Image (cartoon, rainbow, N blue to C red):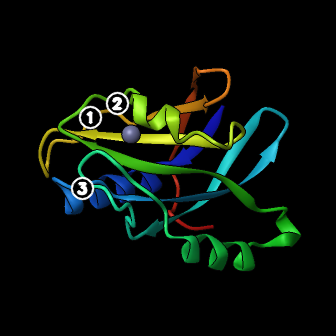
Amino acid sequence: MIRVTDQHLNTLKAEAGAAFPLECCGLLAGTVDGKVISVTRTVPSPNVSTHSGRDHFEVDAKVRFDLMRDLDESKLEQIVGHYHSHPNHSGEPSPTDLDMAFEPEMIWLIIPLQSKAKVDDIGAFRLDRELRTIESIDLEIISGPAGE
Ligand SMILES: [Zn+2]
């Protein structure tokens, strides 16, 4: 299960709307307690995909590097996943997503939207490129701030 705050989700929806009709993307930092992953922050990234940006995304390596250096080790904060939007698509992972799933432990949040303002429910998944599996993950939304 992955736990996010309502403000995290509002932040992601706003980013997806601002990027529409292109894809937004970013990283998720969080803590892991047994089977519960709690997101501590969402970190936006430029979409550096060399494809059109309409159906591909790639997180900037510098954003990941900077976040790794900034993680709060006293809280065992780590990079737990990433997010991207699906402009004019469903919230299901795409075949391209599966092809790009090199890190099977990562959580994928997908933000589907049909227009700048019409964002559908966000889904959480684990994808495994080797096994060709897509696992749906329970998403728990709690009220709280976007940061810690
Ligand atoms: Zn996708």
Identified at 59% across, 30% down, the residue is: 127
Q: Is residue 126 left or right of residue 74?
A: left
User: Label 3 vs label 2: CA separation?
Assistant: 19 Å
Mark 1: amino acid: Asp
- The image shows residue 84, relative to residue 24, as above or below, that is above
Could one spot residue 93 in this view of the protein? no
User: Label 2 vs label 1: CA separation?
Assistant: 8 Å
Q: Where is residue 68 in the image (x, y as percent from the top left)?
A: 72, 72
Mark 2: amino acid: Gly
Q: Residue 35, located in which quarter of the rendered image?
A: top right
Mark 3: amino acid: Ser
Q: Is residue 132 left or right of residue 16?
A: right
User: Label 1 vs label 3: CA separation?
Assistant: 23 Å
* Residue beneath disc 3: 52
Q: Is mark 3 within 8 Å of ligand 1?
A: no
Q: Which residue occupies the foreground of this view, 143 or 33?
A: 33
* Residue beneath disc 2: 91
Chain-order first, disc 1 or disc 3: 3
Disc 2 to disc 1: CB gap under 8 Å = yes
Q: In this view, does 98 lie to the left or right of 46?
A: right
Which quadrant of the figure shows ligand 1?
A: top left
Identified at 55% across, 46% down, the residue is: 4
Q: Residue 120 carries which label?
A: 1
* Badge 3 element: loop
